[in-house]
Image (cartoon, rainbow, N blue to C red):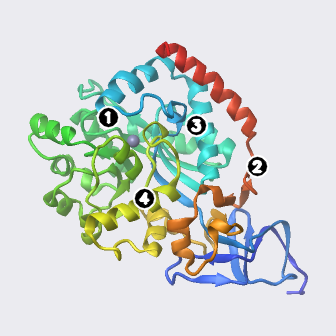
Amino acid sequence: MNGSPRQIDLLIQGGIILCMDAERRVLEGHCIAIDKGRILEICPDSADKYQPKQSINASDCIVMPGLINLHTHLAMTYFRGLADDLPLERWLNDYIWPLEARLLNRDFIYHAALHGAAEMIKNGITQINDMYFNMAAIADACTAAGLRAVIGEVVLDNGSSSPKKREFGSMVLEYRQRYADNPLIDFCLTPHSIYACSRDSLEQVVHASRKHNILLHMHLSETRSEVEQCQKERGCKPVQYLKEIGMLDCPAIYAHGIWLDEEEIDLLSGTPSSIAICTDSNLKLASGILPLASYLKKGINACFATDGVASNNNLDILAEMDCTAKLHKAITGDPCFLPAPQVLAMATVESARALGVERQRGSLEAGKDADICILSLNGVESQPLYNPYSQVVYNLGSKQVRDVVIQGEVVLRHGVLQKLDEAELLGFSRQYQNQIKAELKL
Ligand SMILES: [Zn+2]
């Protein structure tokens, strides 16, 4: 060591750092040294230790791990506000699925996904878990935006038994190979739901997951009617059905999980399953409210998600955290339920655990990927500050998201997207909006 400063890619200085590590350290007067996409160290701030190519002054800010959105349909972003105030089945059958059948092509998916990726980043989200069509278009859009994503090609055969074996596992492996040099992108298996998939397809998905240890991502028990349908057509409750076909042995993220009874929650307990909580979407579609207290009591990992923009109508995890925490305090009648540090853990470390990447991200620690969200405290609406966790969960919103770093790259700086041109995104959005209006004769 000759004492000369070490050259690094990025240095974040100052602020209140919520590490979200095992000790839940909260640091002040520190800096985060970042090089080659990873956190090199978090140490007391010293002006001469590092010579960064780029630096961020985070004084008057909260610095925390980037938020993870555990269930999304990124390319549905152009359907925001379309056909609101309808039941889920009508919304899907009369609007979304017919429109998708007519409009979806690579360009539409790419541009809608790019628009959604920009919104995620502006909301402090650094990683998503996405389910849709055309994995390459989604992967390319996320890469262009600099957003980290796990992507799945939805398996959707509407219950009709598929005559031939489909190589779901090989497809994921082939895409992993294709994007092997891209640290932002990974792929998983995404059967849509019990009601939209044949038993044959689901068994093949389970086989592929077991054979190659691939994560599953699926909708589960979003509406009461799909539970009734499962009992009528398959002779058992949804989670019993998943157990029967072997899915409960696979690492899986189940979106919604509203209508599970205690017996089903017991079946999920102790399995490598996580629940993606989609509060806003569930409230808006009047689908119901998930039994979160029961999940947590039985040790089931539950984390936040926005679902697609079409049913939310935004991609805002900070809003989900606030709304979910308050809703479930009211439901349990317990203001101590879901304290703020636990809520932030669910949006960061616990989400990383759901994705099986808790060793790589979810907290700010040396050696982990540099996925970071910086929130401004520099405004009357953000002050005074006594507890940074409660400030994040109950007070700060997407408006305070100032800078976002993903894989060591600054993708949002002072609220401005660094890899995308927002005016250009708005131009494409207007163009596709007109096309959708013409299709629906609006
Ligand atoms: Zn969904």
Cβ atoms at labels 3 and 2 below 8 Å apart: no
In the image, taking residue 250 as reference, residue 381 lies left or right, namely right
Disc 3 target residue: 113
Closer mark to the observer between disc 3 and disc 1: 1
> The residue tagged with tag 4: helix, strand or loop?
helix
Estimate how packed mark 2 is, as few (under 14), some (14 to 19) or many (20 or more) residues with alpha carbons within 10 Å. Answer: some
Disc 1 target residue: 88
**Which quadrant of the structure image shows residue 137?**
top right
Name which of mark 3 and mark 2 comes first in the sequence.
Answer: 3
Figure check: 325 above or below 283: below
Identity, as a three-letter code, of the amino acid under mark 3: Ala
Estimate how packed mark 1 is, as few (under 14), some (14 to 19) or many (20 or more) residues with alpha carbons within 10 Å. Answer: some
Name which of mark 1 and mark 4 comes first in the sequence.
Answer: 1
Inter-mark Cα distance, 1 to 4: 21 Å
41 or 167: nearer the eye?
A: 41
> The residue tagged with tag 1: helix, strand or loop?
helix
Disc 4 target residue: 323
Identity, as a three-letter code, of the amino acid under mark 1: Leu
Q: Whole-percent x and y of residue 180?
A: 60, 48
Res. 418 mark:
2
Closer mark to the observer between disc 1 and disc 2: 1
Estimate how packed mark 4 is, as few (under 14), some (14 to 19) or many (20 or more) residues with alpha carbons within 10 Å. Answer: some
Name which of mark 1 and mark 2 comes first in the sequence.
Answer: 1
Identity, as a three-letter code, of the amino acid under mark 2: Gln
Which quarter is ligand 1 in? top left
Figure check: 42 above or below 263: below
Q: Is the N terminus in the top left, top right, bottom left or bottom right quadrant?
A: bottom right
In the image, taking residue 237 as reference, residue 216 lies left or right, namely right
